[in-house]
Amino acid sequence: MVEEFEEAFAAFCDTSHAVAVNSGTDALRFAVMACGVEPGDVVLTVPNTFIATTEAISQAGAVPEFIDIDENTYNISAEGLQDFLEQKCMRNADGQLISKRLQRPVTAVVPVHLYGQMADMDSILRLAGHYGLTVIEDSCQAHGAEYFSGKLNRWMKAGTMGRAAAFSFYPGKNLGACGEGGAVTTNDAAIAAKIKMLREHGQAKKYYHDMEGYNGRLDSVQCGLLHVKLGHLAKWNAQRRDRAAEYDRLLAGNEAVTCPYEPSWSRAVYHLYVVRAVDRDGLARHLKTAGIGTGIHYPVPLHQQKAYLSMNYREADFPVAARLAGEILSLPMYPQLSAEQQARVTDEILGFVHDELISQ
Ligand SMILES: Cc1ncc(COP(=O)(O)O)c(C=O)c1O
């Protein structure tokens, strides 16, 4: 059942391999390890992601360093990445790219397709190619999202463009298990084989251990369930896109709430529908009183988290991520959300915005 699901998920993602593991965090940790990132290397990522992204990097023995995000897509800024590589790195005597701040080799970048929106992969891959960085996609929120590669002149699925990619099957994800789960996708047979070893105590053959690994398997019951749900994923993603378009329509023309921006090169799968509001906390309180649940993904950017105090970052180091954290609000979003429910959510939002304007 595990192999059957892996085959089906690889086919869905358009990759030659998918390896099921027991969480998205393990998927990313194993991908970082299998892609040849060495202990002590710097891996670049964004500060506005779930901490699992940086945990996976650290637990693979590497050190995360942050790049600020794009103001519109909320994903890694290609300009920010370029500035970092040009200005905050140098070459050592061996020609290795070194982070000036950490004095360690920079060897990989992990773009996160946050909220199911695609990062600008052509730009990232071009920079990565130029600087010799390995790209590992954090696709944990982006099952089935697509990116139009101008370079290749075709649509590409999330999880097919990096050397490897991590997916999460946490129950709330677009494809969710009945418990924890994850997968690594890759077109590289050697990486897939290494991940199979990492997930099972470093063995390629039962009780013959070529290295130390982990207990990172995904059990067959979850795979069976995921396989059934996978058959519905394209339809559910399309329903999420319809719901997102309806929110866009209902909220159009009001300046107090900004809807998500989907560039022409992206077909997002709206794991979350995240708006920006000037009085975010007031709006969230108002919706709660009206019986409407919302979320904040995420309230504190990683560079300001207690866990990373020792990195000595200042809030202003990543101004876009820091500002957005105070403005973002995730509205109810799931495939079965009805038009009536959506109208109620947007009526409450527009009512709140209107009352605030009057009281000013
Ligand atoms: C962006 C991102 N990366 C990594 C993960 C980790 O996935 P999991 O919770 O399955 O370990 C998640 C899931 O919550 C996520 O949203």
Image (spheres, rainbow, N blue to C red):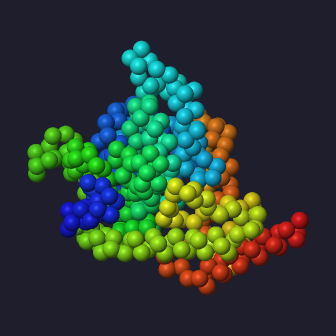
Residue 99 position (above or below residue 153): above
Q: Nearer the viewer, residue 155 or 187?
A: 155
Percent x, y of residue 213: 24, 45
State whether residue 54 appears in this view.
no
Rendered residue at 22%/50% (across/down): 196
Extreme residue toward the top, this view: 93
Q: Nearer the viewer, residue 308 or 145?
A: 145
Q: Quadrant of the C terminus?
A: bottom right
Residue 141 position (above or below residue 237): above
Left/right of residue 190 with respect to residue 180 in the rendered view: left
State whether residue 243 appears in this view.
yes
Percent x, y of residue 95: 41, 19
Left/right of residue 65 with respect to residue 7 in the rendered view: right
Rendered residue at 24%/49% (across/down): 192
Left/right of residue 175 with respect to residue 284 in the rendered view: left
How many numbered tags mark residues here?
A: 0
